[in-house]
Image (spheres, rainbow, N blue to C red):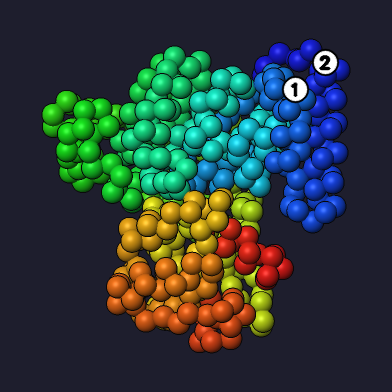
Amino acid sequence: MAANPDPLSPRAKLAVTAGKAAAAVSRAAGRGSGSVIGGRVALKLDPELLGRLAQHLDVVLVSATNGKTTTTRLIAEALRAAGPVVSNALGANMPAGITSALAGGSDSRYGVIEVDEKYLSGVARDVEPKAIALLNLSRDQLDRAAETRMLAEHWREGLAGTKAVVIANADDPLVVWAASSSPNVIWVAAGQMWKDDAWSCPSCGGVMQRPGDDWYCGECGFRRPAPSWALQGDYVLDPHGSAWPIHLQLPGRANKANAATSAAVAAVFGVPPQVALERMYQVQAVAGRYDVVQFMGRDLRLLLAKNPAGWLETFSLIDPAPAPVILSVNARGADGTDTSWLWDVDYTRLTGHPIFVVGDRKLDLAVRLEVANQSFQVCDSVDQAVQLAPPGRIEVIANYTAFQDLRRRIGN
């Protein structure tokens, strides 16, 4: 564990107090958890506060396009076997939100922190993590985050020479390129369903060859590293070749991959795979994701999908046709205002499902579904969609702010 911190300076204590007060005012006004505004106020008063709050913690940072909130939760559960954990469990993953989370962790031993991809290098510089988990990189919020190759290069430059142990997905060429500048990398074969952002070599621009699960560039020799941890069916294989069963309440292959990476991270902190995986079973839902709720006398399962890779994974875990499906898409600031990504989603996977479309950008989504030859109905509200849906559990798939809208309406 990191050395005990010096007492916070008067300035830092003032910043923490002011941030908590601002967050309380925001909550009282009904404007959310207040974590972001609280962190902004605190950092305004002490720009070095994030590093000060982390100095007594063994920190792991988790970053990716998809799965970082769930993986953060799984790692936090695993590390609680070894001591108290502070984490930004609700997903406020930029510096202000992270600062607010760490302000409540004075008695914690570990900090498990989800970090927005764009801010990873800066947060890593501030908190000096012991470990960094890198899961995947794919197109997402192109109006804000830019092209994935540029983001991988940003990670690569920011993590060059880091003292942290980097736990990285060997199956994603962009992640491998980003992590390869780090001197201490543990490779995990976690799989990659979405491949459309990694057909060109991030090292030289050549065409990537993908025989089976392997990948390599025939021009420069950049290739998949040999993993020391691997997801194999319902098991995690550790570096000694032992197979540990994965028992999760969270559905889908993607969450097994998240568990495999989480087990590798936990091992860095001395938590054995068996203990780590047993603790992960306790996670039933993550910030409302995967929850099954009652609304208007019907069972609705809430699923978050923010980009093409996320929608691909989500389609693989919904109930088979003819289970009814509600789709909701917004394009607000937190979602990214560019909806062109809808055309990269293979909506033919929904053939046979009764589909109901809601959300701010329901007409954009309707056009995309029409081109995909899907049968659907555009609805004014989730209430109307539920009324029209045939019997059976309803799968509700939404992007970020649409998901929050639905949770507020449903009362979850």
Q: Residue 178 appears in which quarter of the rendering?
A: top left
Quarter of the image for the C terminus: give it: bottom right
Front-most of residues 307 and 249: 307
Residue 178 in view, yes or no: no
In this rendering, which labeled residue sits more in front, label 1 or label 2?
Answer: 1
Q: Could you tell whether 53 is left or right of 177 in the image?
A: right
**Residue in the image at 21% along x and 28% along y:** 204
Return the residue at label 2.
9
N-term-proximal mark, 1 vs 2: 2
Mark 1, other Cα within 10 Å: few <14 / some 14–19 / many ≥20: some
Q: Could you tell whether 152 is left or right of 247 in the image?
A: left
The image position of residue 185, as x and y in percent, is 41, 23
Which mark, residue 46? 1
Q: Helix or strand or loop: what does disc 1 sit on?
A: loop
Q: Residue 373 appears in which quarter of the rendering?
A: bottom left
**Residue in the image at 81% along x and 29% along y:** 16
**Residue in the image at 37% along x and 81% along y:** 375
In this rendering, the answer to whether 74 lies above or below 302 is: above
**Residue in the image at 41% along x and 80% along y:** 376
Label 2 sits on what residue type? Ser
Residue 44 in view, yes or no: yes
In this rendering, the answer to whether 177 lies above or below 301 is: above
Q: Are marks 1 and 2 in contact (CB under 8 Å)?
A: yes
